[in-house]
Amino acid sequence: MTAIDSTPRTVLEGTEAHIEATEKYAAHNYHPLPVVLARGEGAWVIDVDGKRYLDCLAGYSALNFGHTNERLVAVAREQLGRLTLTSRAFFNDQLSGFAQALTRLTGKDMILPMNSGAEAVETAIKVSRKWGYEVKGVPAGQATIITMEGNFHGRTTTIVSFSDDDVATSGYAPFTTGFRSAKYGDIEAIASAIDETTVAVLFEPIQGEGGVVMPPEGFLTDLRRLCTERNVLMVADEIQSGLARSGKTFACDHEDVVPDIYIMGKALGGGIYPVSAIAANHEIMDVITPGSHGSTFGGNPLAAAIGTEVVAMLEEGTFQARSAEIGRQLEAGFSPLIGQGLSDVRVRGAWAGIDIDPSLMSGRQMSEALMARGILAKDTHGSTVRFAPPLVASDEDIAGLVTAVTEILAGA
């Protein structure tokens, strides 16, 4: 019989105690705002001291459907009591339904499930390279992938190899080769970078980490045409921009463009469980053979059950419509502030980036001022703040966000 460990567990109370313990025992790879969250419901969260906050980050869009969404929690609870993990050494009774649902949503033939967004990007890179060798006929070891300046696809060694963010790359060399960078949104620059070794163009339809940066109108259409003409895979990272965040199911839908590979994550797990996947047609996905790629947890029953319900919710269309309405409200509220403390405003669905006049304050200072007013947001690149509220946020919630930003800029 195993002895029971009777060591007393430390019970922490209050914000300062939690922050102190986290800073002492957890690596400092983030610089969070000084708030310790304990509960969440819908678009709102509550800290350990009982204060409520409107969550305008939504787990970097992982919480599109809100905190503790009743439908998703019910599915997760049911599956938790049945079966959570088998590994892909066996079939399970949830993966088939998830795969069928996600192919229906994307219009693709097959999916390959993983866990984190970075894993999905790595999977897309591997599939693109193998397709390049086995289908396109690129000489062994010479495949190249075009990536975009200002990109963010994750933090693995390979992914930061094509990042131009000094913080993400400093101290982690040597890097993986085989990538060429082109200016985001510049179709001529991308065309010039493509040669006979190019297997894919990897891009974000909207660059979230950069502050909701969108390419010029028509870029996605031009990129689709270019990739088709040059026999290069168009690989869309829709991890943040997809699954209703931009007001459409996918951000590529704004130009009625269908990429060769969709990369999905974050909201695919409903903010409950890490779920990611890529989707593509047979001629691309068939390069994956048994043993050539895998994941212990990828496609597990719990993930698949949650993912299936996420797809069902998206197929109803209500979240896309709500996202678009939130976007109209954000646009109407933030745009008049250009020249009144803001230098630029970018909105696409329930996703906004505002650039603050740096002579007034930094993005971090704006985030801290918003936190003091009961609103949580995230700064990036010095003077930019991103907003991505859950799609269940009410009109009153969004109006409160706009009012708070307006008053902070005015010095109120």
Image (cartoon, grey):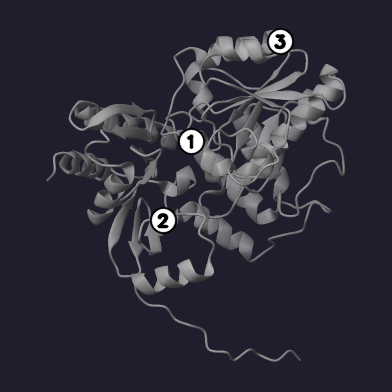
The amino acid on which the numbered mark 3 sits, given as a three-letter code, is Arg
On residue 316, which mark appears?
1
Q: Tell me the residue at 64%/10% (across/down).
A: 192
Q: Earlier in the sequence, mark 3 or mark 1?
A: 3
Residue bearing mark 3: 230
Q: x and y percent of residue 13 in the render? A: 37, 77
Mark 2 or mark 1, whichever is nearer to me = 2
The amino acid on which the numbered mark 1 sits, given as a three-letter code, is Glu
Q: What kind of element bears circle 2?
A: loop
Q: Tell me the residue at 86%/24% (across/down).
A: 134
The answer, for residue 98, to whether it is visible in the render is no
User: Crowding at label 1, few (<14), some or many (≥20) Cα neighbours within 10 Å?
Assistant: few
Q: Nearer the viewer, residue 69 or 143?
A: 143
User: Circles 3 and 1: CB distance less than 8 Å?
Assistant: no
User: Circles 3 and 2: CB distance less than 8 Å?
Assistant: no
Q: How far separated are the C-alphas under marks 3 and 2?
A: 44 Å
Q: How far separated are the C-alphas under marks 3 and 1?
A: 37 Å
Position of residue 96 relative to residue 48, above or below, is: above
User: Crowding at label 3, few (<14), some or many (≥20) Cα neighbours within 10 Å?
Assistant: some
Q: Quadrant of residue 76?
A: bottom right
Q: Nearer the viewer, residue 29 or 200?
A: 29
On residue 32, which mark appears?
2
The amino acid on which the numbered mark 2 sits, given as a three-letter code, is Pro
User: Crowding at label 2, few (<14), some or many (≥20) Cα neighbours within 10 Å?
Assistant: few
Q: Tell me the residue at 63%/66% (across/down).
A: 81
Q: What kind of element bears circle 3?
A: helix
